[in-house]
Amino acid sequence: MAIDKFRPESCCIVGNYYSLKGQRTKAIPYFQRALQLDPSYQGAWTLLGHEYIELKNTAAAMEAYRNATHTSPTDYRAWYGLGQTYEFLQMPLWALFYFRKATQLRPMDARMWASVAQCYLSLGQRDNAILALERAVSHQDSEGIAT
């Protein structure tokens, strides 16, 4: 079986390799190349956003995540990434908006609910935070995020 180095998937594999090694600036060009080959490749947009967040380039991360949401509005990862970006910027109301969108798309994921709870706490809405944490725990929070 031959591997086509000009497929966007191949570029993302190489980008992920560098990402896992913590070499963000080497990973980014591979995700960008994947998007040159296929601008509608949602996964590459999301992965690019993750890399920009790690480099604390929030403007570029937001652009990548927004492109991902336009390409595939039903994939929770980009919505969650937007939430994380706004959380990083200490904008909990905006983060809450995007985390809630992620919970609508993936309602059984404890991580989504734990992030919603954190936003509620940041906004001083303790009762809503408790409800969100209860949802997280009820969805088999195997990672212990909500406890």
Image: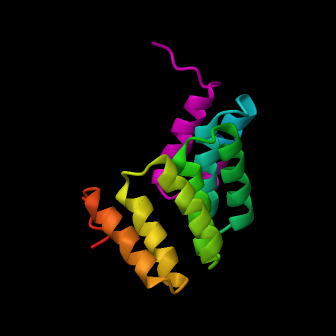
From the viewer's side, name the closer residue of 84 and 52: 84
**To which quarter of the image does residue 71 belong?**
top right
Q: Is residue 122 left or right of residue 61?
A: left
Q: Is residue 57 above or below residue 35?
A: below
Q: Name which residue lies at 51% across and 87% down.
A: 124
Q: Name which residue lies at 70% across and 51% down.
A: 66
Q: What secondary structure characterizes most of the magenta part?
A: helix
Q: How many numbered marks appear? A: 0
State the scheme by which the image is colored. Answer: rainbow
**Where residue 70 appears, x then y in whole percent?**
71, 42
Task: Residue 99: say if magenta.
Answer: no
Q: Is residue 113 above or below residue 39?
A: below
Q: Is residue 18 something that shows in the picture?
A: no
**To which quarter of the image does residue 87 belong?**
bottom right
* Extreme residue in the bottom direction: 124
Q: Is residue 117 above or below residue 111?
A: below
Q: Name which residue lies at 29% across and 56% down.
A: 139
**Where residue 36 appears, x then y in whole percent?**
75, 34
**To which quarter of the image does residue 44 belong?**
top right
Q: Is residue 123 left or right of residue 109?
A: right
From the viewer's side, name the closer residue of 76 and 85: 76
**Where residue 24 appears, x then y in whole percent?**
58, 57
Q: Is residue 9 something that shows in the picture?
A: yes
Residue range in magenta is 1-28
From the viewer's side, name the closer residue of 88 and 69: 69
**Where residue 81 appears, x then y in whole percent?**
57, 58
From the viewer's side, name the closer residue of 29 and 36: 36
Q: Name which residue lies at 45% across and 12% down.
A: 1
Task: Residue 10: say if magenta.
Answer: yes
Quarter of the C terminus within the rendering: bottom left
